[in-house]
Every structure is written in structure tokens, then in C-alpha cells.
Image: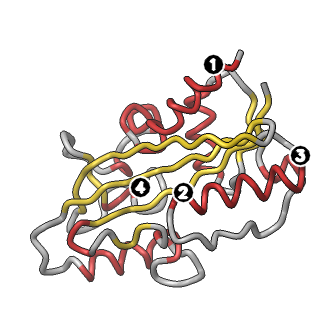
Amino acid sequence: MKLVFATNNLHKLEEVQQLLGSTMALQSLDQLGCFDDIPETGHTLEANASQKSHFIFEKYKADCFADDTGLEIEALNNEPGVYSARYAGEERDANLNMDKVLLKLKDVSNRKARFRTVISLLINGKETLFEGVVEGNITTDRKGVKGFGYDPIFIPNGYETSFAEMDIIEKNKISHRAMATNKLIAFLKNLK
């Protein structure tokens, strides 16, 4: 089976392809020939994931899936949430986003946070949603250089290392995206 993954984020594509293995071929937006700026105007992760998958399905008539992920920090009323990628501005700068989080939590003792991913799958026009959540805490400074986004400031519960200190195989055992993707894979296997 061939599916379009509605993302331009090569790190996400690599993580998900690692989880899928050879069971299916993922096609990126570049490979599809889609260079549009796909809208993400929803106020929830579910709405954004759905908006992206519907955009691709309607324009290219291709079975596809899209995800949206947010970092939800308890002490910040679940900010940055759906605005995680552009928390510090429209330029979507991960370092500026992390700076903003660390500054807002400077004198805060409650560092509880969670990453949440929602995947919208469209097969023959029928949508199914999958969710993955990983609980953890925000560090006081960056740790590690692997991963992307907020990975250097997030330590999952039960670990002493940030996502950015883990290799992709270790991260994929516990990450929010892995949990949602594993639900997607199980669903796709049942379609065969």
C-alpha cells in the first residue's frame, strides 16, 4: 500500500517510516508534487490534522494521512498546544519557541507537560483519527542535539534523558507520534 504523509518535515517522515518499516511506502509532499502551504487554521490538533489530510485528498485524490502535534504544559494552561510550531512567531523557529517556554517557566516549580499527536487518515474519503500521548516534564535548559522541535527540553516520565538525547529507535519506543502511528499501522493491517 502507498500512502501520502502530508508533511514537509523530513524528521517526522523519517520517524514514521522507521515505524512502518517495509510494510508500506510513504510518499512525501515533495514526491507528490505538492508545494502548497497547506492551511492549519484549526483551534485543535484534531482540526489541523483533519484540515491537512482533507486538503491533500481533495486536491490529489490520494489516500493520505496528516498529523498535528502539540506540547501541552500544565502550568501554562496547556500552552503552547496547537500553536506549538509558531509559539514564538510565524517563522516557526524551534530555538525561539524553546526560549519562550523556558522563560515562562523560569520560576515555576510545576514542570509537568505532555506531547500529544493526532493523526487524521483518509482512505477512500473516509476519515479515522488516532491519538498518542506521552507525559513528562520540561527541563530547565536544553539537553541533547538529536530530534527536533521541543525535544531538547522534554524528558518523558520514567527517563532521565530528553528526547533530544535519545536515538530514533529509543524515542520511537515511547513517543507520542509512535503511539499514534502504531494505532494507524494496526488499523491499516486490518484493512488488508
Q: Nearer the viewer, residue 33 or 39?
A: 39
Distance between mark 3 and mark 1 Cα atoms: 22 Å
List the residue tagged with mark 4. 145
Ranked by sequence position, the earlier of labels 3 and 1 is 3
Distance between mark 2 and mark 4 Cα atoms: 29 Å
Label 4 amino acid? Answer: Val
Distance between mark 3 and mark 2 Cα atoms: 21 Å
Distance between mark 1 and mark 4 Cα atoms: 34 Å
Residue 140, image x, y percentages: 20, 68
Quadrant in the picture for the C terminus: top right
Label 1 amino acid? Answer: Lys
Residue with the most extreme left position: 109
Q: Residue at x 52, y 76 (%)?
A: 86
Mark 1 vs 2: CB contact within 8 A = no
Which structural element holds mark 1?
A: helix
Specify whether 100 is left or right of 23: left
Q: Nearer the viewer, residue 109 or 75?
A: 75
Which structural element holds mark 3?
A: loop
Label 2 amino acid? Answer: Glu
Label 3 amino acid? Answer: Lys
